[in-house]
Image (tube, rainbow, N blue to C red):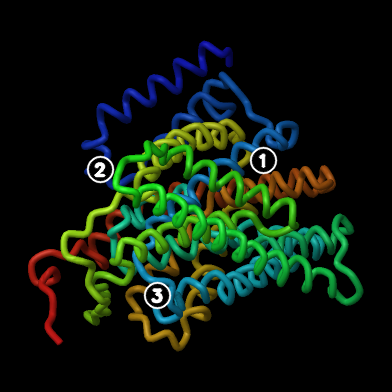
C-alpha cells in the first residue's frame, strides 16, 4: 500500500471512530475488533492491499510495540487509586508473580507435550503468552485517576506489572535455546534476570517518580505558575526511567510503571490527600482512608499528562491492530493455533488466577472475571519480536509467530465480544443501592 493509501485508511478510520463513538459504546464489541476487521479486510486475508511480514520487519515492530507499551504502562500507573500497601496490592502482586509462573508452566507444558515444541521454544511461548495486555484491555482497565473499582484496579495493576515480570521467563526460554547465558544451574538467570533486573527496575522507577514529583511540587509551591509542560515531563520521565533501566540491565517496563505510580502517590502526599477517600469493594466491604485537606486542589503532572498519553495510546492501538490484521492470511487459521488459544483462555488463565488469588479472600465473582479477562495482545507481540531479534531460529520463529497471532486475534475477538455483556451482568456499575455508602 502506498503512503497516500495509508494516510487515507488511517484518516478514514479516525473520522469514523470520532463520529460514531457513541454508537460503538452501545454495541457489544470493542474498537479493537473493528480495527482487526479492517486489517483483515485490506490485508492478505481480504483485498491484499498490504502485507506486514513480522519476520522481516521484526525490528520495526519491536520498536513500535515497545513504545506503545511504555506509554500504556505510564497511563496505567498514574491511574492507580490505592495507596501502595500490601493489603491493597496483594492480589495484583500475586497475579503478576504466582499466576505468571503458573501460566508460563501450563502453556509451556502444553506447547512441549501437545504441540511438539522443543523445551526452550515451549517455555518461550509460555512467556510470550503469559502477560496480560495494558493496551487492548481498555474496557476492563481503570478509567481515570479516581476510579476505585476493584475489578478494574486488579486487572490494570496486574497488567502494569506482568509486562515486566514476564521478561525473566523470556530470557529463560532463550537460554534453553542457547541464545542467552543462564549460568551454572541457572544461577546467573536467577541472580541477574530475576532478582537484580526486577528489584533494580522498581528502585529506579520509584526514585525517579518521587524525585520528579518533589521537583515539580517545589516549583509550583512558590505561589506562581512556573509554566511546566506536563506532557513533556511525563514523556521525559518515561524515557529517563527506561534508559536507565536498559543501561543497568533492569526491566524497563517495571520501572516505567512504578515510576508512574510513585509520581502520582508522591504528588497526592504533597497535596495532603494521599490516603484520601473510601475504597468500596465489590464484596461490600469498605476501606476508609484519612481525608484530604478541605478544598485541596493541586495541579499534578500525573493528571496533566494523562490525556495526551491516552490519545497516543488509542492512536497506537489503531495502527498496531491494523498491522496485526495485515499479518494474517486465510490459511493462518489452523487447529493448532485455535486449540492453543482455547487452552490459554479456558485452562491456563483461570487456573493460574485461582492459584494466585488462593487465600486472598476475594469474592468468587471477581476471581472468575479476572480469570476470563486476561487479554493477550501488544505485549505478546513485543516479546515475540524481541526474541526474533535475539536470534530465534527462523523455523521456530515462524511457528511461534503463527501461534501467537492466533492467540492474539482470538483474544481480541472473544474478549472483545464478551467484555461488555459480562461486565453488565456480573459487575454492573454501582448505582442506586450500590452507590450508597455504609456507615461504620
For marks 1 and 2, give the CA distance. Answer: 31 Å
Residue at image position (58%, 48%) is 406
- Residue at the image position 13 percent from the left and 68 percent from the top: 435
Residue 25, disc: 2
Hey, which quadrant is residue 155 in on the image?
Answer: bottom left
Front residue of this view, candidates 30 and 7: 7
Q: Circle 1 — which element? A: helix
Where is residue 238 drawn, in percent x and y? 55, 47
**Residue 172 versus residue 280 in the image, above or below:** above
Measure how far apart labels 1 and 3 are at the Cα level.
33 Å
Residue 367 bears which disc, if any? 3
Tell me the residue that label 1 is attached to.
62
Disc number for residue 343: none
Q: Earlier in the sequence, mark 1 or mark 2?
A: 2
Up the image or down, 136 lies above or below 156; here it is above
Report helix, strand or loop for mark 2.
Answer: helix
Q: In this view, does 175 lie to the left or right of 413?
A: right
Marks 1 and 3 close (CB-CB < 8 Å): no
Q: Is residue 105 above or below residue 57?
A: below
Any part of residue 275 in sight: yes
Residue name at image x 88 percent, y 62 percent: 181
Amino acid at each position: 500500500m502506498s503512503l497516500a493509501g495509508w494516510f487515507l485508511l488511517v484518516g478514514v478510520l479516525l473520522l469514523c471512530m470520532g463520529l460514531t463513538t457513541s454508537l460503538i459504546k452501545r454495541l457489544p464489541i470493542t474498537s479493537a475488533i473493528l480495527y482487526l476487521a479492517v486489517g483483515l479486510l485490506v490485508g492478505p486475508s481480504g483485498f491484499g492491499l498490504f502485507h506486514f511480514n513480522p519476520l522481516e520487519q521484526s525490528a520495526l515492530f519491536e520498536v513500535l510495540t515497545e513504545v506503545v507499551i511504555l506509554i500504556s504502562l505510564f497511563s496505567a500507573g498514574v491511574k492507580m487509586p490505592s495507596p501502595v500497601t500490601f493489603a491493597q496490592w496483594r492480589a495484583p502482586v500475586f497475579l503478576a508473580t504466582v499466576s505468571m509462573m503458573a501460566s508460563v508452566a501450563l502453556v509451556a507444558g502444553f506447547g512441549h507435550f501437545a504441540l511438539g515444541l522443543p523445551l526452550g521454544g515451549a517455555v518461550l511461548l509460555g512467556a510470550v503468552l503469559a502477560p496480560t495486555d495494558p493496551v487492548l484491555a481498555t474496557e476492563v482497565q481503570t478509567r481515570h485517576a479516581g476510579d476505585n473499582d476493584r475489578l478494574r484496579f486488579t486487572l490494570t495493576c496486574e497488567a502494569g506489572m506482568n509486562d515486566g515480570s514476564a521478561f525473566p521467563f523470556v530470557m529463560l526460554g532463550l537460554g534453553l535455546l542457547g541464545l542467552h547465558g543462564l549460568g551454572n544451574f541457572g544461577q546467573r538467570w536467577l541472580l541477574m534476570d530475576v532478582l537484580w533486573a526486577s528489584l533494580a527496575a522498581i528502585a529506579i522507577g520509584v526514585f525517579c517518580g518521587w524525585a520528579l514529583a518533589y521537583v515539580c511540587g517545589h516549583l509550583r509551591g512558590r505561589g506562581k505558575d512556573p509554566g511546566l509542560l506536563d506532557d513533556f515531563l511525563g514523556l521525559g520521565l518515561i524515557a529517563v526511567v527506561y534508559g536507565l533501566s536498559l543501561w543497568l540491565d533492569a526491566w524497563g517496563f517495571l520501572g516505567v510503571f512504578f515510576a508512574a505510580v510513585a509520581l502520582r502517590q508522591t504528588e497526592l502526599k504533597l497535596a495532603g490527600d494521599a490516603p484520601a477517600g473510601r475504597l468500596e469493594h465489590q464484596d461490600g466491604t469498605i476501606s476508609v482512608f484519612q481525608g484530604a485537606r478541605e478544598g485541596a486542589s493541586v495541579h499534578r503532572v500525573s493528571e496533566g499528562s494523562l490525556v495526551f498519553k491516552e490519545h497516543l495510546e488509542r492512536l497506537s492501538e489503531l495502527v498496531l491492530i491494523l498491522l496485526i490484521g495485515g499479518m494474517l492470511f486465510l490459511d493462518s487459521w489452523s487447529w493448532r493455533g485455535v486449540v492453543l488459544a482455547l487452552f490459554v483462555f479456558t485452562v491456563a488463565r483461570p487456573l493460574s488466577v485461582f492459584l494466585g488469588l488462593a487465600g486472598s479472600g476475594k469474592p468468587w465473582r471477581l476471581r472468575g472475571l479476572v480469570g476470563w479477562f486476561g487479554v493477550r495482545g501488544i505485549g505478546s507481540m513485543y516479546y515475540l519480536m524481541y526474541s526474533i531479534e535475539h536470534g530465534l531460529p527462523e523455523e521456530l520463529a515462524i511457528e511461534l509467530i503463527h501461534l501467537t497471532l492466533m492467540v492474539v486475534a482470538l483474544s481480541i475477538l472473544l474478549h472483545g465480544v464478551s467484555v461488555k455483556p459480562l461486565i453488565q451482568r456480573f459487575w454492573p456499575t454501582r448505582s442506586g443501592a450500590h452507590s450508597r455508602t455504609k456507615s461504620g
